[in-house]
Structures are given as structure tokens and as C-alpha cells.
Amino acid sequence: MLQKGTPTMIEQLITSFIAAAAFGIIFNAPKNSLLQCGFVGMLGWAVYFSFVSYKFDPVLGTLAASFIVAFVSQIFAKIFRTPMIIFSVAGIIPLVPGGMAYDAMRNFVQNDYNIAIQLAAKAFMLSGSIAIGLIFSEVIYRIFQKS
Amino acid sequence: MATSLPNINEIMDVCLLAGKIMLENGAETYRVEDTMARIAAGYGIKHSHSFVTPTGIIFSADGSESTKFSRILERSTDLRKVTMVNSLSRLISNGELSLTEAYHQLKVLETAKLAYPIFHKVAAAAIASGCFLIMFQGQWRDFLPAFFAGGAGYFCAVYLERFVRVKFFSESLAAFIIGLMALFFVSTKIGVQMDKIIIGSVMPLVPGLLITNAVRDLMAGHLVSGLSKGAEAFLTAFAIGTGIAVVFSFL
């Protein structure tokens, strides 16, 4: 079906870097933090993509990726003395299960409720794992800070 | 009770203004409360209380008779302003900024237009859409269709919101336009996979910031604002879904 093979890891890294930096522009992040935004986004996506391509569950991949994103954002926030949200938002966006939510919606519209609810439940699980990854890294970071 | 400061009203004004700017530009609730408490402490109010929701801030300080309230009508995302208020509050807690100076700077910041020009944002959204298409295993052939559909969709969302002032409507109309363009590209054989094009182009509209903020607020114990931000995120997702769904009824 696919002509020139599926996109490779390098393509994934480059596109995720650009996409995350572009999101920095959409959210009006300060100009000198755009590169860091791109880096955080690339890192998160690389983790997620490697988990998924080694046939792990996407939920686990999302959890690991959002953990890494939040952790690196916290370190950047400390270094550059800015709110953490600037870096974490751009990194989280690619992990949001937009595609799955879309599929669910499409099935709902086509009156295929069984599949739609399955997909919606999965999308919900994925958003939950983003949340847990964020919280988890925050807790670990606090523990590190105290010791 | 606490020693009453002579200029307590001005201090409260500065706190409220800082909180208002941060909240209007997409900061998390706990950060807003934290910043207001820090500013108050920087000017000598040891104990202050604030109640922050996405639609309003209530702030009171020990030693003052009055409690102040500020209404938040419009919310958008401008992380640069959040950063600037953050650094102002850092200056204040170090005692490097006088009260009148701080108020003046915040007033300037409140109305300043620091956003990137709309053209840059649309270009960024278009590029991001194309990149997301590749990230979601699309083919390079679909890059340009996603690029144009994503840019057009984002432009519509921003422009229409200025026009009609109802976020739900502008978002679902933008999603509808994205769906139509994807349908057009696929039926003229310029694009191949309609699903991938739509998913990629819709990404700039997805409420990612709201979702992360909602979760962090909930976990930090700000139940009211967490839930209401979650509701806003859900409404946006629903709007996008509706817009796309209408296109499918044409298929």
C-alpha cells in the first residue's frame, strides 16, 4: 500500500521538532524558548515512537513520553527561570490522542456505536496516562529537590 | 491582627492585576495563586487568600477590610505575558520594584500586543499540520494538502472568533472547512489518505493546553477550576468533532 516505505525515525524526529516549535509560536512562547520547545517535543515523541514501534502498548508509551516531557520541562524551567508550562505544552500536544478521538467520532457518526465506544474508551485511557505521567514526574522532581 | 499597611489597597490592586493577566493568558490556577501570594508577601502582606477560577479571581488580605474581585471575560493563550508577569513577581519578591512602578508596568503589559503576527501563527499552524501528518504515519504526498487545510482551518478559527465571539461555533466551522478541504484534495487525487489529512490539520485546534492545565489543577486540589477547564476542553473537542461529522454526512 505505502509507496516509499513508512516514515523513518529520522523523519519522525525532524517533523516532531518542527511541529513542537511551531506550537510554541501558536501559543506565543517567547522567541528564545522556541528551540527548547522543539527539543522537548522531539524527545517526548521519540520516546513514544520507540515504545510503539517495539510493539509496546500505546498507553505505556504515552505514560513514559509524558513523564519525560514533564521532567525535562521542569529542568528547563529551572535553568531559564520561566514557568514550566511553556515547555511542557508543546511536548504534550503530539501525545494527545487526536487521531483516536477522530476515529471514535467518525464511527459515532456512521452509527457504528460499538467500535466508537471502544475507541473513545481507549482515547480516554491515553489522556489519563498523559495526566499520570505529568503528575508522576512532578512528584519525583519534588522528591529529588528535597533530598 | 497584622499591622495594617497604609497602601494596602494599592498592593491588592497590583496582586489582582497580575493574577488577571496570568489567568487571561493561559497560566495554571495554582501558579496564579502562588504568584499573587508572592507579590503580596513581597510588599509586606504576610497572609493573603485567593480563590481563582477560570472566570474570576477573589482576593483578600489580612489587615484589610475589603475583598476584591476581578472578572475574567476572555481567555486566550499568550505564554509570553505569563513569563513576563512571572519575572515581574520575581523582581517584586526580591524587593527591586516599587509599588507604583509595578502597577504601571502591569498596566502596560495588560494591553500590550505581544503576540506574533497572525500571519506567522497561521504559517506555524500550517507547518505543524504537515509535520503532524508525517508523525502520524502519513505519506509525504499528503504533506501539502495537510499544510493548506491546517493553515486555512486555523485562520478560520482565529478570524471567526473575532467575528462571532462564540468559540464553539468558530471551532466547529473551522473543523468543517478542514474536512471540506480534505475531501476536495482527496477527490481531486491530490491527496491520498483523507483520514490522515484531517487528523494532521485538526491538531492546531486540539485543546492540548486546556487538558494539561485541567489535570494539573485537579491534582493540585483546585477542583472547581480543574473541572471547568476540563469542561471547556471537552466542549472544544466536541466542536471539532461536530464540524468533521458534518463533512462525513456528505460522503
Image (cartoon, rainbow, N blue to C red):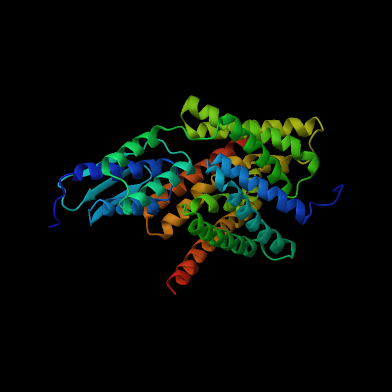
| Relative image position of residue A5 (x, y in whole percent) | 85, 51
Q: Residue, x 47% and y 55% (percent of image)?
A: B215
Rendering coords of residue B69 (x, y %): 26, 41
Residue at the bottom extreme?
A: A147
Q: With respect to residue B164, does B244 lie above or below? A: below
Q: Let me know if residue A10 appears in the view.
A: yes
In the image, B45: left or right of B109? left
Q: Quadrant of residue A59?
A: bottom right
Asked where in the image residue B238 lies, by quadrant, the reply is top right
- Residue in view at x 45 percent, y 56 percent: B216
Q: Quadrant of the C terminus of chain A?
A: bottom left
Foreground of the two, B188 or A95: A95
Image position, residue B29 (x, y; %): 39, 51
* Location of residue B239 in the rendering, given as x and y in whole percent from the top left corner: 54, 38
In this view, the residue in front, A108 or A135, is: A135
Relative vertical location of residue B37 with respect to residue B238 in this rendering, above or below: below
The quadrant where residue A49 appears: bottom right
Residue B249 visible? The answer is no
